[in-house]
Image (tube, rainbow, N blue to C red):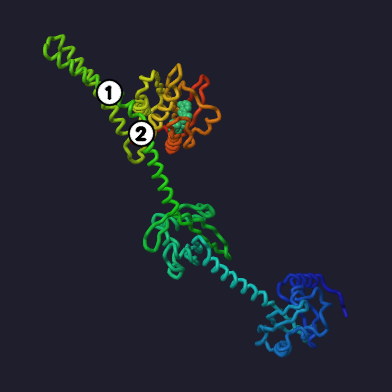
């Protein structure tokens, strides 16, 4: 007999060997006497052994569950009797593997012939069905795990497929949105959002699926939610993505922000209330100085008027000229008194925050009308320098006046015992975006250990002080997008500086 093997046959055998070694299914050759003679690695694993010689002589019959042996033999018989119709029909049997496991196995059998065409045995392929069962069980378990999560997850959770169709809706989502899971399953998540988010959502999703660019996934956003009863509420939405097979699944966690928003709105109301109250208290402390300040023009008016009345009695041309002058002066004084009263009325008005484009010079001059009330009597001199190329700022007039009045009143108080009493107000541009306004005094200054705490509420060195003024000033300036700071002047005294956003000429024209 010629035992030599051609190189093509040799290649083919190597190829078959490789297939058998890597095939996930078990392949065995069983001789006509039921002896197992060949088994690939998947087959060894199925029978729970490391090599063929660990398998008992009487395998496979000795390893097949007893009640399945007749079924096996029948199928074997059919395979060797070569009835093509029945060939390849799957046979389900249990195998008691040598590693102690019982495995459920799906087998197929085909006759094996030798080189002369004589029947030599059967090729059995077998697939471990226990794994599939295991997988199925895992899937069922994950599904019940998911429903347990959905039932207990504290934040409402919505799962949607890549078309935006809802596939799960947690118990808390049901409570929040007012829909039952049955009502929303299979419907588009857009039903939970009002327009324009609703219309934008489909676009977001398509954009993401097409480009992979994340606009919301993994980021979280505050958007509006729509309940079944039609009411809207603010919610934080965090979206995650999971790939199941080839299809992405989107999970959305919702946090209801209604309470947080209400609390913030309430805080803002309280803040506005505080800012207003502090203005009222500023006016309270100004009251006596104001009475004095108003008294001056009013007394002047009264004097000019009585002089005028006397002059009317003997009207000569030069008396007429004096009369005209007296009337002019009283007119001016009346205007001055009126201006102080008007500023005061604006200052105590409540009003909404009203940010406007305002000329800085006017803002500063209006603020000094009130802030410097009574300063002259205390021997305080002042200067106002506004650099010429500053134009408009974006500010709430009354609130910025409040800041300036506060800084000026503090400065005047700090200079009570100083020999030099000078208040310098300066304004200059700070880059293209901001202006910087400073209020510098020649007062007693601030001790180093106190300077970092000045803006905290209730920090005061004054017997009657509340220590709220500067903290309110900082709140106001920061609400304008600016910054308020303090430094000690090298010549003694203190400089408070704050910034305000500039309003460009374009804004100016637009307004
Ligand atoms: P209050 O005036 O009620 O004390 P503020 O918040 O306006 O509250 O001021 C806090 C403290 O900051 C004052 O008590 C004072 O010690 C200090 N301070 C404020 N402005 C000046 C200033 N121009 N010079 C020195 N100290 C100042």
Q: In the drawing, does residue 439 fall left or right of residue 123? A: left
Indicate yes or no: mark 1 CB to ligand 1 under 8 Å.
no
Label 2: how many Cα within 10 Å (few below 14, some 14–19, many 20+): many
Question: Residue 45: where, in percent of width, then height?
Answer: 75, 74
The first of marks 1 and 2 along the sequence is 1
* Residue lying at 47% horizontally and 37% vertically, measured from the top left: 457
Q: From this viewpoint, is residue 498 visible?
A: no
Q: Which is nearer the eye, 237 or 189? A: 237
Question: Residue 164: where, in percent of width, then height?
Answer: 47, 62
Q: Which residue is mark 1?
A: 295
Element type at marker 2? helix
Q: CA distance from mark 1 to mark 2?
A: 26 Å
Q: Quadrant of residue 511?
A: top left
Question: Residue 25: where, in percent of width, then height?
Answer: 71, 75
Q: Which residue is mark 2?
A: 397
Q: Nearer the viewer, mark 1 or mark 2?
A: 1
Q: Which is nearer the eye, 102 or 264? A: 264
Q: Quadrant of residue 146?
A: bottom right
């Amino acid at each position: 007999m010629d035992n030599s093997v051609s190189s093509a046959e040799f290649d083919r055998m190597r190829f078959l060997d490789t297939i058998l070694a890597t095939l996930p299914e078990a392949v065995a050759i069983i001789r006509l006497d039921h002896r197992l003679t060949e088994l690939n690695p998947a087959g060894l694993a199925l029978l729970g052994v490391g090599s063929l010689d660990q398998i008992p002589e009487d395998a496979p019959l000795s390893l097949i569950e007893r009640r399945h042996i007749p079924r096996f033999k029948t199928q074997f018989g059919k395979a060797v009797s070569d009835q093509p119709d029945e060939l390849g029909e799957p046979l389900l049997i249990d195998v008691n593997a040598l590693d102690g496991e019982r495995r459920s196995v799906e087998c197929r059998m085909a006759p094996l012939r030798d080189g002369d065409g004589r029947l030599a045995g059967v090729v059995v392929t077998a697939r471990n069905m226990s794994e599939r069962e295991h997988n199925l069980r895992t899937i069922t378990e994950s599904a019940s795990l998911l429903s347990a999560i959905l039932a207990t997850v504290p934040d409402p959770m919505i799962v949607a497929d890549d078309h935006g169709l809802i596939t799960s809706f947690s118990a808390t989502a049901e409570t929040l949105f007012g829909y039952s899971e049955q009502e929303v399953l299979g419907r588009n998540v857009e039903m939970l959002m009002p327009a324009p988010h609703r219309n934008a959502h489909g676009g977001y999703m398509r954009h993401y699926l097409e480009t992979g660019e994340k606009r919301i996934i993994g980021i979280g956003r505050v958007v509006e939610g729509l309940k079944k009863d039609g009411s809207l509420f603010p919610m934080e939405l965090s979206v995650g993505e999971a790939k199941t097979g080839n299809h992405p699944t989107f999970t959305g966690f919702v946090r209801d922000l209604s309470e947080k928003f209400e609390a913030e709105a309430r805080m803002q109301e309280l803040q506005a209330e505080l800012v207003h109250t502090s203005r009222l208290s500023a006016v309270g402390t100004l009251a006596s100085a104001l009475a004095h300040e108003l008294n001056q023009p009013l007394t002047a008016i009264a004097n000019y008027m009585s002089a005028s009345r006397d002059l009317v009695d003997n009207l000569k041309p030069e008396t007429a000229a004096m009369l005209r002058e007296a009337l002019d002066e009283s007119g001016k004084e009346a205007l001055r008194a009126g201006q102080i009263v008007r500023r005061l009325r604006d200052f105590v008005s409540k009003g909404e925050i009203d940010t406007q484009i305002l000329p800085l010079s006017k803002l500063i001059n209006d603020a000094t009308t009130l802030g410097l009330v009574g300063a002259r009597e205390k021997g305080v001199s002042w200067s106002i320098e506004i650099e010429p190329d500053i134009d408009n700022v974006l500010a709430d007039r009354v609130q910025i006046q409040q800041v300036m009045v506060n800084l000026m009143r503090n400065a005047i108080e700090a200079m009570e015992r100083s020999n030099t009493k000078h208040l310098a107000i300066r304004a200059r541009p700070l880059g293209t975006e901001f202006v910087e306004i400073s209020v510098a005094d020649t007062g007693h200054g601030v001790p180093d250990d106190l300077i970092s705490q000045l803006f905290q509420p209730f920090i005061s060195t004054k017997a009657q002080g509340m220590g709220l003024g500067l903290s309110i000033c900082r709140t106001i300036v920061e609400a304008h997008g600016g910054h308020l700071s303090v430094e000690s002047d090298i010549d003694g005294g203190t400089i408070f500086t704050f910034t305000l956003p500039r309003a460009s000429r374009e804004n100016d024209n637009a307004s």
